[in-house]
Amino acid sequence: MKKSIVVIALVVLSFAAVQNAMAQATATQNVSLAVNAVYKIATSGNPGAMTITTGTAGTNALTTVSDASTSYSITQNFASTVKVTANLDAAMAAGYTLQLNLASTKGTSAGTVDISATTPASAANVVTNVALGADANQAITYTFGANASAGVLASTAKVVTLTLTN
Amino acid sequence: MKNYHKNIAIRFWIAGALGFFSVTSASGQDASANQTLTLQVFEANKIDISQRALTLVINQASLETGNPVEAVNEDGNLVWLTNGENKKITVATNNAVPRFLVKVHALDITGSSGVAAPEIILNDNTTRDLVVGVTRSWGKCKIRFVASSRVSDGVGTETHLISYTITGG
């Protein structure tokens, strides 16, 4: 009996000791998290050269050429009102046109948009109401046109900027 | 000792979590992307005639002169396109020695440029100017054929294969 009491006491004492040790084995910290707005857009590269070579007798507009070899991808977590705009580094000269079509599964594509007159200060909406999330490898289609009255055009580089914005 | 290791582990986990979130919030901002397009326009020249074939029949004579009356056709339209400079439209027949007289002339030129040359007599297969001063334009004109003969030419038939060419510059 005395032995059992001692054992029980030892057990109780051990338990108490363990409890006491456990009570001092945790500590708390407040961790503050922040996720900022993320806008990310990238393209797959540059399209191939677009060269106009022919037309129809009696018609000023030469036969247009198109390129759909590139794509774009976006990621955004900001709002469902985010849009994609497009602009040229400088407006096209008179008699030449450039149209752009961006496909989209996350937003509303504006279809084929004439970006001939756009500049860095004046961009055109090409996709609107882009939902939160990612939209990968969506097709970009360019269409280049020219009038016969504009004459020939030596190889010219034009820079198109696609911007993800709210 | 066990508690010491446990606390160290907790601290490492929290530091790692904080580090992860701070990296995530700083990495996002590629808000625009550029593409470079290469554009060019080569010289393009196109010409076409609406009337692929026609027949001129001289079957009357003038009571006053006794000569056959000319046969005239103005049903054909010539259309063209060029984005080049200082072009002209020429005309030629493949008939090097025609028996009967055929004349051709461009009438009612419309479009941004081009002036009709004087009426042409197709008396050999030499290439001659039909419309001149064509620069960066599209246009059309009526083609007028006049066929005539002399009594001494007798009767008969002959053919001409007429070629229109936009050239020069």
Image (cartoon, coloured by chain):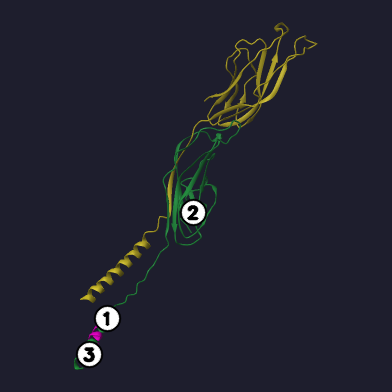
Chain colours: A green, B yellow
* Residue A27 placement: quadrant: bottom left
Tell me the chief SS of the magenta region.
helix
Circle nearer the N terminus (2, 1): 1
Please check whether the numbered discs 2 and 3 fall on a single chain: yes
Whether A31 is drawn above or below B35: the answer is below
Q: Is residue A17 magenta?
A: yes
Which mark is on residue A9? 3
Q: Which residue is mark 2?
A: A84
Whether B48 is drawn above or below A140: the answer is above
Looking at the rendered structure, the kind of residue marked 2 is: Val
Q: Residues within 10 Å of mark 1 (few under 14, many from 20)?
A: few
Q: Nearer the viewer, mark 3 or mark 1?
A: 3
In three-dimensional space, the C-alpha distance between marks 2 and 3, rounded to whole angstroms, equals 75 Å
In three-dimensional space, the C-alpha distance between marks 3 and 1, rounded to whole angstroms, equals 20 Å
The residues colored magenta run A12-18
Looking at the rendered structure, the kind of residue marked 1 is: Met
Which chain is home to disc 2? Answer: A
Q: Nearer the viewer, mark 2 or mark 3?
A: 3
Whether A154 is drawn above or below B65: the answer is below
Q: Quadrant location of the N terminus of chain B?
A: bottom left
* Residue A32 placement: quadrant: bottom left
From the viewer's perspective, is B55 left or right of A66? right
Residue A91 appears anywhere in the view: no
* Residue drawn at the location 42% of the way across and 60% of the way down: A38
Q: Which residue is mark 1?
A: A22
Q: Nearer the viewer, mark 2 or mark 1?
A: 1
